[in-house]
Image: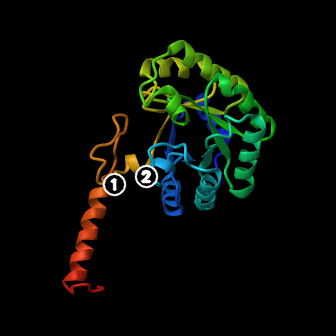
Amino acid sequence: MRLTPLKISEYKREGRKIAMLTVYDYAGARILDEAGIDVLLVGDSLGNVFQGKSTTLPVTLDEIIYHAEIVSRAVCNALVVVDLPFPYCQLGSSDAIRAAARIFKETEADAVKVEGGKNRASIIAALIDAGIPVMGHCGLLPQSVHQSGGFFIQRQRDNLLADVKAIEDAGAFAILLECVTSEIAKEATEILKVPTIGIGAGKDCDGQVLVFHDVFGYVPPENKRPPKHVRQYADLKTIITEAAKNYINDVHNANFIIK
């Protein structure tokens, strides 16, 4: 039976840390689910790591639904959260509800994730009122990269604490903190009743999330090193490259023998 948003919220009171990873395909989701991951995020980061685009902004609702349906079909135990892509929250509550409703009707997702602070609180409340669980997302906001001027560590303490409190009050069951100083993330974690899940936000959050391709080294050749906040647990790029070269050599040298 899958974990629920309510159970994830309870993990904070139980003192249990939350392990979360992004995933975009059936095989990856199945492997991570069987490994015991708590939360799987079908993130609009698929625009960067799966589609090779420079931002998450071009990812469409149809594309996020396509990947979410595949991932949800693979999962038996983990909570599946799906990013609400740009610009549905920016357009207001009605558009956000319609988009989230499509995600719920066309996939087996358990919750959506919404980027933004107090300016998204009313939209999050409307989604929850419509029966759609929401994970918040504060700090660095990839969907607002053009407005913010780029990707950098968030250091505005008062604004961030006001944002996370507004998101909690709106009813979010958890809040992702992206690229926030460890001191601010720790303070936010201490004042909130719902769990925080950090990415580049230090060790004191209630959980951690990383991008699948970063954590397993499954990246294109031009990506020579992972982002500073990433702890890489495998080097699939090297393993796959070496295996591919061995296969190519065997075929070219007429040495392709099934043992």
Viewer-nearest residue: 47 or 26:
47
Q: Check contact, mark 1 vs mark 2: CB within 8 A.
A: yes
| Distance between the alpha carbons at the discs numbered 1 and 2 | 9 Å
Nearest to the eye among marks 1 and 2: give it: 2
Residue type at mark 2 is: Gly
* SS category of the residue bearing label 1: loop
Give the residue drawn at x 63%, y 28%. 194
Residue type at mark 1 is: Pro
Q: How many marks?
A: 2
The answer to whether 73 appears left or right of 216 in the picture is: right
The answer to whether 149 appears left or right of 57 in the picture is: left
The answer to whether 147 appears left or right of 181 in the picture is: right
* SS category of the residue bearing label 2: loop
Task: Identify the residue under disc 2.
Answer: 52
Viewer-nearest residue: 71 or 102:
102
- Residue count near mark 1 (Cα–Cα under 10 Å), binned few <14, some 14–19, many ≥20: few
Task: Identify the residue under disc 1.
Answer: 220
Q: Is residue 103 visible?
A: yes
Give the residue drawn at x 64%, y 40%. 87
In the image, residue 238 sits, relative to residue 45, either above or below, namely below
In the image, residue 162 sits, relative to residue 229, either above or below, namely above
In the image, residue 28 sits, relative to residue 125, either above or below, namely below
Q: Is residue 132 visible?
A: no
Give the residue drawn at x 34%, y 47%. 233
Instruction: Give coordinates of residue 40: x percent, y percent.
Output: 55, 48
Query: Which residue is farthest right?
Result: 130
User: In the drawing, what numbered circle is on residue 5?
Assistant: none
